[in-house]
Each structure stands twice: as C-alpha cells, then as structure tokens.
Amino acid sequence: MAAAVPVPVFTTIEQVFPDAAVLLKQGARYNLLAEQFEERFGKKPMYIVRAPGRVNLMGDHIDYQLFGVLPAAVERDVLMAVGPRDEGDPGRVTVQNLDSKYTRQTFAPVKGSVGGQDWSLSIDKTQLRWESYVKAGYYGVLEKFFTDNDELPRGLDLLVTGTVPAGSGLSSSAAMVVASTLSFLVINEKLEGMSKGDLVKIAVENEQRVGVNSGGMDQSSSVISNADSALYITFFPHLSAEPIPLPITSPRSVFVCANSLVVSDKVVHSRTRYNLRVVESLACARVLAHRLGVPIGETEKLTLREFLDRWLGVKKGEEIDADALKKGLEYIGKELDVLKLAESDGSNGTEIGVTLEEMIEMSGLSAEVFKKVYLSWVDIDATRFQLYKRGKHVFAEALRVLEFREVCLRAATDAPDDAGSALCELGRLMNESQKSLAELCESSCPEADLLTRLANEAGAYGSRITGAGWGGCMVSLVEEERVPEFIENIKALYPPYHGLKGDELSEAIFPTKPSNGASVFKFT
Ligand code: NG1
Ligand code: MG
C-alpha cells in the first residue's frame, strides 16, 4: 500500500499563493471582485481567499462513522476579497456579497465569557442566514488566538462571490466556512506556520457552530485537494489525506454534476434523516460489540470504524493498512448477515427494523444508560430502527471507497489503454453505491433514482447521488466528448429540467474536474 501522504504545512502565505492555474482561467473574475471591493470600501483588498466546493466520488454516510471517503474539490468556489478596517470597534466586520440577494451585514464580537467561550458572536441557528457562515469562520479564530486580553482581533471588510450552487450537496457551506476562517486568519497574521490539518480542524468545529453534526469530509476536501486528483481522506486513527490520481485522461472523462433540484433541508429533516442515520449506525456498533464480545465501555459511543479495529484486535494507536482494512470489512460484512440484527416481515424478506425496546434489549445496556448515551445528545424521531441495513451500507460503502482507490492507483501504473476498463470499474462502483444509498441507507429519493438511471441510459460509466442525499446533486462519470449530448439527453428526459436554458441549465447540470484546495492570493 502507498503510504498516506501527511497533510502538508503552510509555512508561509506565499506557499499557497498564487495558484497560477486558477488565475489564468479566472483572472477576470478576480479582477472584477477586486474592483468591486475598491468601489464599495474605498480601498484595494489586501487578499483574495478562495475555497472550493466538493463532490464526493465515493463514500457517503460513512465519514461520521470515521471511515475514509473519496471526494474531490470542484472548480466552483467561494471567493472572498478582504482588507483590514482601520477605524470602528476592534474586530468589527462588514460583509457584502456581489449577489444582492445576500444583504450587507455588519457585526462585532463581544469579549466576555458566555457558556465557557471567551467571545460571543451571535449565530442564529434557527434561521439560515448567509452571514452565519462568515461568523462561524470568525468564531474559531477568536477562540483559538484571542483568548488573552492583550491582543484584540483586527476588523475587516469582506466582499463575497460564489459559484457553488447553494443547498445542492456540493458543500457551498464548507466553502464559505473555509474561506471565512482563512480570511480571519490571514488578516490577523495567524496563518503562518499553520498546517492544513490544523485549518481543517478549526473549519470543522466552525461549521458545527452553524448547527450540523457532520463529519469532516467537506472541509478536508475544500482545504487539502489537488487539481487532477481526488483525495482519500481518513479520519481514524488520525486525519490524513492521500492524493488519488484519477484515470480520466484516456479517454478524456469528466464528472458531471446534475442537480435534482430537490432541496433537502438537512436541519429541518435531521430528526428523521441525517441525525437518525448517525444514531442508527452508532447503535449498530454497540449491538455488534455486545454480540461479538468486543470490549466497549458502558457510556462509550463507539463508531463502526473503531468497533472494527477492536474486533480485529488492532492495538490502540496502531494503524492498519488498506489491505488489512479491506479484509476486515469483508469479514464483518459476512458476520453481519449471520447475526441478523433486524427481523424481516417474513413475506418478501424486507427488513422492518427493530423497535426502541428491541434495540435496547439487543444493546445489553439498561434503558436508562442506552437513552443517555445514544439519545440524549441529539434529537431524533423514529418508531423503528434499521441497524442491519445501516451497518450493511456503512461496511460495504467503506469497502467501495478502498476499491475505488485501488482501481485508480492501479490505472496510474498500468498501460494507458487499460484506462477505459478502469473507468468502467469506477462506474460500476458508483452504481453499486447508488443502489446501497437507495436501498440500505435510504438516503436517495425518487428524483435522484430517476436522474441516476437516466445518466446511465445516456451513456455515463456510472452515476450516484453525492453528499447527504434526499435530493441535491448526482455525480456521473462521462466521456468528455459525449458531455453536450449527455446533457441534452438528460434535459429532454428529466422533467424538472424542461424549460431550463442558458445559465439556468448550466447551474443545474455541469461538468467539473478536480480542482485545487483553498488558497490565499496576496495583492502586492
Ligand atoms: P452535505 O451533502 O454537504 O450536506 C453531509 C455531511 C458530510 C457527510 C455527507 C454524507 C455536513 C456539513 N456534511 O454532506 O460530512 O456526512 O453528508 O456522506 O453535514
Ligand atoms: Mg453542507
């Protein structure tokens, strides 16, 4: 196995500046943003910060169980032009957006201990407000660097523009939070010496301040990605990222993102969807540990990844390689079938799940302890729980991530004419993933099922929903020269696209290649 490349370090700002490839392609956009900044704030910006969205190529609903994922940053991004403010209260921020539907906001943090925090900066979690993402980025910087009384944060003016469609599973939120975290770091001269791993950690905590219990995939790919490769990101036993070259040069192929135009409000539905998946998979780990005699503390919320290591007898802190992990996943997948964690209704073998009482009984814990450990920290709503299906999805999807990685690494060393078969292999894995997301994780929706089917009929190698699901975007692997025809076909057959033209259509369905992670451009 190729050793995972440690997360690189930013030693100076210049090291991440400039990203020549981006500037060449997008120079006009950067200039316009800088001009607009000057017009609005009466001075030139000091920096432009860029953070991309991401498309997850393989591995959904497994990052919060600490299994590795394989996303790539997309070309679409968030740009923030930033300059320091000289006057006004220390730390005051004014944010504007080139898109006038996001109105101008100004705010200043208040020093003083609130709920154990050194600063307060009110973030309204009950409403989706655009400036919350800017505040979230600020918060972590305040809490990490401005805890003693001698130094106050520098205020700043900020102008934002973005091309990642909002609410579509391409992580516009992570792009916003990463860009704003970087903006506050760079203006306050705190970026030097910081590793990308540190930045990811701050950005993950920052995004959780807006109110989601997510894993670390989105911020990692927005920060760490490289152009022309995807990233294999692992979270356990520690964060690491390995660039994975994609076999997309012969025949030239691209990933096409297609928005189902079904908006899934993750916060509103989290009780029956995202957060429920988190609880079901944690409960699955508990029941497995109990049944298989794997040591687990009474109040320990073990993830499925941690459970697997213990089951395999891996020593604490030791890292197993991809091959051993693959074998472990294959074994546990079979074991899960034997254990029958849920009952089928007997008629057609459909899993009907277990009740809360049954789940508690299976866990070996008292009802009181079970509820405290698994249900008290999160709000969920269900009468039946699908432990078998969720566990089955997580282990099989984690295995597909390793297979996807392996196909790519093999194609990078094989003869070039084998690339076509590598693309077919990747497509097959994408289709299997879609089936598992639809049937086992139950995070697809009829529109997504239709779009992925149409994508395959229109000649994609494979197609799957990406990100949290229940709507949002599909990602399909398509030969580049077939893309115009592919888009035409989907447009004709997917009813929500009828009538879309020009920008509306290219907002909904567009090809993308892996892009570089976040960068900071300094004006000299
Ligand atoms: P999206 O699709 O960006 O909402 C969410 C989580 C990820 C991951 C995926 C499912 C957030 C911010 N991100 O992504 O960590 O769990 O779902 O694989 O909630
Ligand atoms: Mg998001």
Image: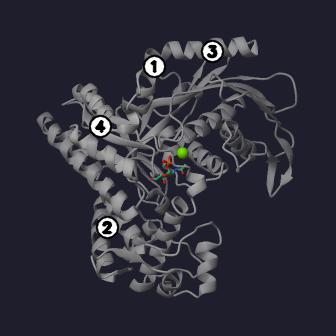
Dot 2 lies on which element?
Answer: helix
Mark 4, mark 3: which one is toward the viewer?
Answer: 4
- For mark 4, what is the residue? 493
Distance from disc 2 to disc 3, alpha carbons, whole Å, reads 50 Å
First in residue order: circle 4 vs circle 3: 3
The residue positioned 56% from the left and 41% from the top of the image is 174
On residue 329, the disc is 2
| Residues at circles 3 and 1 in contact by the CB criterion of under 8 Å | no
First in residue order: circle 1 vs circle 4: 1
Q: Is residue 413 above or below residue 37?
A: below
Distance from disc 1 to disc 4, alpha carbons, whole Å, reads 39 Å
Dot 3 lies on which element?
Answer: helix
- Which residue type carries mark 3? Ala
On residue 509, the disc is none
Local crowd at mark 1 within 10 Å, few (<14), some, or many (≥20)? few
Residue 56: horizontal and vertical position, in percent?
A: 40, 45
- Which residue type carries mark 4? Leu
Mark 2, mark 3: which one is toward the viewer?
Answer: 3
- For mark 3, what is the residue? 34
Relative placement, left or right, of 408 versus 71 is left
Local crowd at mark 4 within 10 Å, few (<14), some, or many (≥20)? some
Relative placement, left or right, of 185 versus 166 is right
First in residue order: circle 2 vs circle 4: 2
Q: Work out which quarter of the rendered image holds the C terminus and state it.
A: top right
Mark 2, mark 4: which one is toward the viewer?
Answer: 4
